Image (cartoon, helix red, strand yellow):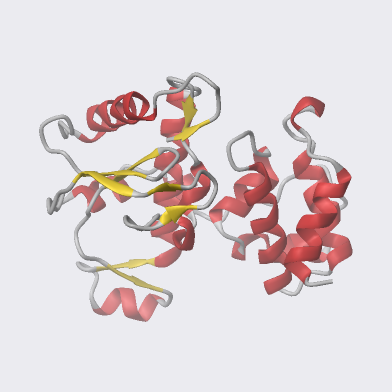
Amino acid sequence: MDPIEEENDPAKALDEALEWFGLWTGIDFALERPIIIDSGRGMQAWIRLDDWACADSKEQIKANPATTIGRAIARRANGYWLKTLDEKLGVCHGCRIDTSVSDLPRVMRCPGTINVKTGRATRFVVPSTRVYTGLAHKLVTGTPKKALEDPPAPEGIEPGQPWQSVFPHLTLMAQNYLRYGQEEPGRHKVMWHTAKKFFELGVTRKEAKKAIRWANALRGSNMELGLDQIEHALVTAYGA
């Protein structure tokens, strides 16, 4: 849970998020506590799932279907439940779920490190070794089939451009940004992430800028970032 208002209580916000998540999954997280982390700014819950291997090929999945899941499926299921919780809670106790953490490299802040944004240490609030056996399967099977499929490219931009050809290969975070835009928290981070993924997939900077300007306007003029901030994201992503 990420504070976005001056008056905020990340601990209460996280408890409310876990209560709703528990109602949907049949788990009483008030009794069966997961790891809780004070990130030095907000609060995080680390919910340990069964040990499934993430694979990129159908052959790997077919070889061990009981313990292997497609990497894209895992990412999309994770993103679906984060987005569903965010839509249910909205701004809660001055905080909001940062849905950008569905991108795996951004998930965890390590306890014992310093959050450079606040100067505060990251620490354990609730340590736990609990494994929620069966929850991974429940989350994947509970995700609507449509949410697990490659979404169509968003309408509104001239079709046939290079960025659209790579749309199914973008991360869920980037896809959602191009389809829905992004509110705070995380607008700058998601914009840069999308630009970086375009660069990695060979999309020209010109086409990336066109797509990002489109996504930047989706939430209305009051939520738009300036053109200078778009340029900064492109410069840092493309290196020029």
The percent position of residue 49, horizontal first and vertical second, equals: 22, 55
The residue under the point 47% across, 27% down is 95
The percent position of residue 142, horizontal first and vertical second, equals: 31, 42
The residue under the point 83% across, 46% down is 213
The answer to whether 53 appears left or right of 86 in the picture is: left
The residue under the point 39% across, 75% down is 58
Q: Is residue 105 above or below residue 179?
A: below
The answer to whether 61 appears left or right of 200 in the picture is: left
Nearer to me, 156 or 8: 8
Nearer to me, 22 or 109: 109
Nearer to me, 75 or 97: 97
The residue under the point 62% across, 53% down is 174
Q: Is residue 172 above or below residue 4?
A: below
Quadrant, the C terminus: bottom right
The residue most toward the front is 119
Q: Is residue 159 visible?
A: no
Nearer to me, 164 or 103: 103
Q: Is residue 158 visible?
A: yes
The answer to whether 212 appears left or right of 107 in the picture is: right
Q: Is residue 28 above or below residue 132?
A: above
How many labels, in total?
0
The percent position of residue 125, horizontal first and vertical second, equals: 24, 41
Quadrant, the N terminus: top left
Q: Quadrant of residue 23?
A: top left
The answer to whether 191 appears left or right of 107 in the picture is: right
